[in-house]
Amino acid sequence: MKTIKGIGLCSLYCNQGDWALDYALSLARRNESALNIYHILDSPYIFQRDTVYADPETKETTQVTPELLAAKDKELRARYAERLGSYPGVGFRLCEGSHEWELKKGYRRGEFDVLVIGYQGKGAVIGGATTIEKLASGFHGPVVLVGPDNAHSFHVNKKAEEILYRLNIPKDRWRPIEESSGEARPAQLAPRPVRPARHDFDAKEVAKGVVAQKWLPNRFRFG
């Protein structure tokens, strides 16, 4: 890899997620690259993604509506606005697919060269069906997990080990990802498969309460 043109961040609303954002932003600044933020709406189902969790504790569910998506988009931007500052190369994406599917597809399409995720601890479940170690170990590109104990602790997969000199990680601060022996809790099976939807919103239209389900020329988008 000659240059890092794009950084992918899988957003998590926790301390580790904030640490991951800070690291991803510093890496983007260092390489003058795009920072593409994926926020994946958790669902109790594997295929049917028009029902998602309404609360962080994943106790209540709700149907996906334009109003919900507009609110989630506004919440995502507001949470990261102060940390991102005026950096111009940031894109946001709400995703209703599985974490693994959405992130792998984004990498295949060249939307990022390195994936960064907050590491909440060994065996942490991501997407309801797999552990974060399994996702990172099986990923086709470099993955950096930030945490779990502090913002200067990093775990990397084999692809990332190959380009450590580009990742700005001190030699004594990283460890290889060790796949968890525990199994993730199974997700409920949906009665019918529904193709994951993807939405990109213009900030002005979101502010007006108008949802724009269209591709925007200067936004992070899927082709």
Image: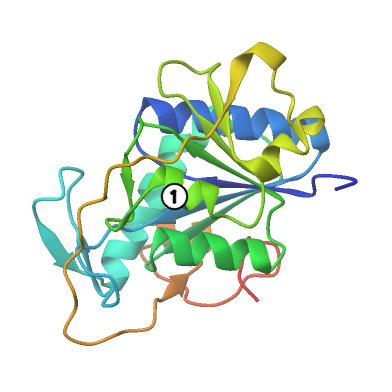
Is 24 or 159 nearer to us in this picture?
Answer: 159
Q: Position of residue 50 (x, y in %)?
A: 26, 75
Query: In the image as oriented, which residue stretches furthest toward the top?
Result: 172
Disc 1 target residue? 134
Q: Horizontal placement of 17 versus 177: left or right?
A: left
Please indicate, yes or no, whether residue 83 appears anywhere in the rendered image. Answer: yes
Q: Amino acid at mark 1?
A: Lys
Is 57 or 129 nearer to us in this picture?
Answer: 129
Query: In the image as oriented, which residue stretches furthest toward the right?
Result: 2
**For the point 73% across and 31% down, which residue is it?**
167
Q: Position of residue 206 (x, y in %)?
A: 42, 60
Q: Position of residue 196 (x, y in %)?
A: 39, 76
Image quarter of residue 32: top right
Q: Image height check: is 8 above or below 191?
A: above
**For the point 33% across and 56% down, which residue is it?**
127
Q: Image height check: is 154 above or below 114?
A: above
Q: Image height check: is 15 above or below 177?
A: above
- The local crowd at label 1, few if under 14, some if 14 to 19, many if 20 or more residues have their Cα within 10 Å, is many
Q: Horizontal placement of 161 versus 201: left or right?
A: right
Secondary structure, mark 1, is helix
Q: Horizontal placement of 195 versus 215: left or right?
A: left
**For the point 53% across and 59% down, which residue is it?**
103
**For the point 55% across and 45% down, which residue is it?**
9
